[in-house]
């Protein structure tokens, strides 16, 4: 499945971010804890340059906790600050300000030495579409300041949000990059909803997800859909079995694959299947 999505407004967004990054002290990059590498836009590194970086593992409540622990260590080893959050419930969000200050410890000390006490930290919040940036900002600010939604492309223009006297956040629209070099990345983003379902083959996407879960979390798949002996089954066979177990049939006893595919994706994205991480540090070659 060849997944590409790069609306025209993303080119404009990138140019705007290149200008805005000069105004901030810190870049807070929100990633999906289930796909910490696939949900990172590689262009962000070029845009951000040597600005201090804080990686926010959002939706950590839906990720495999053991895998998240390994990812946190992986990013720390590479000089990034890290923070584990669930923006929807607010878990971990209250630690953002203190974590940002730890990342900027040297800069804050330099400000104090120059007598710049009370100068607010300005942080740019970046990330791919539908990763939870705006929800995160609203929780940090304790008010609905940034537009948020459960679909990609809700935030279109930059928005400054004042959290308190010591912290200002710049919300930016989510941007993908012009081409996914690795189609696994495109699939992972589509699984989690960062790419609009309207441009994907939903049944093909569900089949790919089922094969991934078959290999990584077979027990969760068996328990949720009451299916057995799945080791040798292909994605379409798994989709058919799930549909039959759920009674999703049409006239003649044929399965309604599209309906089951939509249910599967909704349950995966909503955390109803379990806590999954689809990629691990051990698999990444950077």
Image (cartoon, helix red, strand yellow):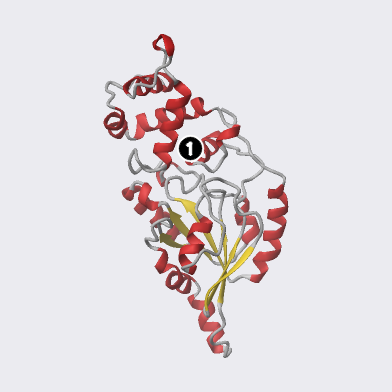
Q: Where is residue 270 in the image (x, y as percent from the top left)?
A: 40, 43
Q: Where is residue 277 in the image (x, y as percent from the top left)?
A: 39, 43
Residue visible at 42% across and 26% down?
A: 260
* Neighbour tally class for label 1: few under 14, some 14-19, many 20 plus, Cα within 10 Å: many
All told, the count of numbered labels is: 1
**From where the camera sits, is residue 207 visible?**
no
Placement of 155 over or under 4, stated as above or below: below
Residue visible at 54% across and 85% down?
A: 118
Q: Which residue lies furthest to the front in this view?
A: 251
The quadrant the N terminus occupies is top right
- Closer to the camera, 252 or 229? 252
Q: Residue furthest top?
A: 252
Identify the secondary structure beneath mark 1. helix
Left or right: 105 in relation to 5: left
Q: Where is residue 93 in the image (x, y as percent from the top left)?
A: 42, 64
Placement of 122 over or under 277, stated as above or below: below
Q: Where is residue 278 in the image (x, y as percent from the top left)?
A: 41, 40
Q: In which quarter of the image is residue 179?
A: top right
For mark 1, what is the residue? 191
Residue visible at 62% across and 61% down?
A: 48
Residue visible at 55% across and 65% down?
A: 145
Q: In which quarter of the image is residue 224?
A: top left
- Closer to the camera, 144 or 132? 144
Left or right: 174 in relation to 16: left
**From where the camera sits, is residue 33 visible?**
yes
Left or right: 173 in relation to 270: right
Q: Quadrant of residue 252?
A: top left
């Amino acid at each position: 499945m060849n997944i590409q999505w790069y609306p025209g407004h993303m080119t404009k967004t990138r140019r705007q971010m290149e200008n805005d990054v000069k105004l901030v002290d810190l870049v807070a990059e929100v990633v999906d804890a289930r796909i910490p590498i696939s949900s990172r836009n590689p262009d962000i590194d070029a845009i951000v340059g040597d600005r201090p970086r804080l990686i926010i593992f959002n939706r950590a409540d839906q990720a495999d906790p053991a895998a998240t622990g390994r990812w946190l260590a992986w990013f720390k080893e590479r000089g990034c600050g890290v923070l584990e959050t669930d923006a929807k419930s607010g878990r971990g969000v209250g630690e953002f300000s203190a974590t940002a200050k730890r990342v900027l410890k040297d800069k804050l000390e330099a400000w104090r030495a120059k007598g710049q006490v009370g100068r607010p930290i300005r942080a740019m919040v970046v990330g791919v579409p539908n990763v939870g940036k705006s929800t995160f900002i609203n929780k940090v600010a304790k008010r609905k300041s940034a537009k948020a939604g459960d679909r990609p492309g809700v935030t279109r223009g930059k928005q400054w949000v004042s959290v308190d006297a010591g912290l200002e956040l710049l919300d930016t629209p989510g941007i993908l990059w012009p081409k996914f070099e690795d189609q696994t990345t495109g699939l992972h983003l589509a699984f989690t909803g960062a790419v609009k379902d309207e441009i994907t083959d939903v049944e093909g996407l569900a089949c790919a997800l089922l094969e991934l879960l078959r290999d990584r979390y077979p027990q969760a798949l068996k328990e949720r859909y009451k299916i057995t002996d799945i080791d040798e089954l292909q994605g379409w066979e798994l989709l058919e079995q799930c549909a039959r177990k759920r009674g999703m049939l049409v006239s003649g006893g044929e399965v309604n694959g599209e309906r089951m595919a939509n249910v599967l994706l909704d349950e995966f994205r909503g955390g109803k299947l379990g806590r999954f991480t689809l990629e691990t540090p051990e698999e990444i070659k950077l």
